[in-house]
Amino acid sequence: MTSRLLRVGYKLLDGPKTIHSSGGNSHSYLESMISIRWHSETFGEWRSVRIYCDANGSDEDGYIEPMVRFATWDRTKDILVLRPSWPSVLIELATLPIDSLELQAAVHRLQEVVGQVPLLRTVFQHDETSVSTQETTEDISPCR
């Protein structure tokens, strides 16, 4: 597998930052609010999920339902092929019911788990003496 096909595979795995409506004169679009990417222990399989929410809907124009995008890439299968024509990234899109209590509970559980894992962010200060590390957690509420 060439480095060019690896780059294409990673781009397909990540997906777009926005999704625009294909019909009408509406200027509404969905914007990515959460993106998570992970891999297997051997780096052979990669997965990603991205949640999109209406970026600029209004009461007059209406709102676009939130969507979720799942992507799976079995890199091992592609690497074993001498010259694959295209990375074998499987992509699935689905709408998310905004009023689903089950979905809201799942997002809440995810926030709790992520909130328990300290994320380290190194902040470099431009004075001669200090480099500080701050521990932060992020609120990942989709479609606020």
Image (cartoon, grey):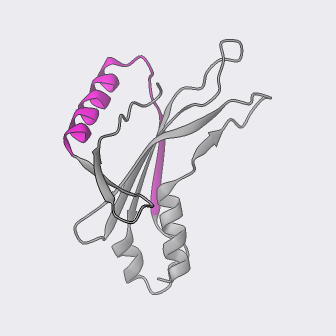
Judged from this view, the residue extending furthest toward the top is: 59
Residue plotted at (39% across, 80% down): 79
Name above or below for residue 56 compared with residue 119. Answer: above
Is residue 110 located in the magenta-colored stretch of the structure?
yes
Residue under the point 19% across and 40% down: 116
Q: Residue furthest front?
A: 128
Q: Does 63 sit above or below residue 90?
A: above
Q: Position of residue 26 (x, y in %)?
A: 75, 27
Question: Quick check: 63 left or right of 52?
Answer: right
Figure quadrant of residue 38:
bottom left
Q: Nearer the viewer, residue 86 or 104?
A: 104
Q: Residue 137: give x, y in percent of width and height.
A: 30, 40
Q: Is residue 36 above or below residue 24?
A: below
Residue 100 is a magenta residue: yes
Region of the chain picked out in magenta, as a range:
89-117
Q: Residue furthest bottom?
A: 82
Q: Position of residue 55 (x, y in %)?
A: 60, 31
Q: Which residue occupies the foreground of this view, 85 or 130? A: 130
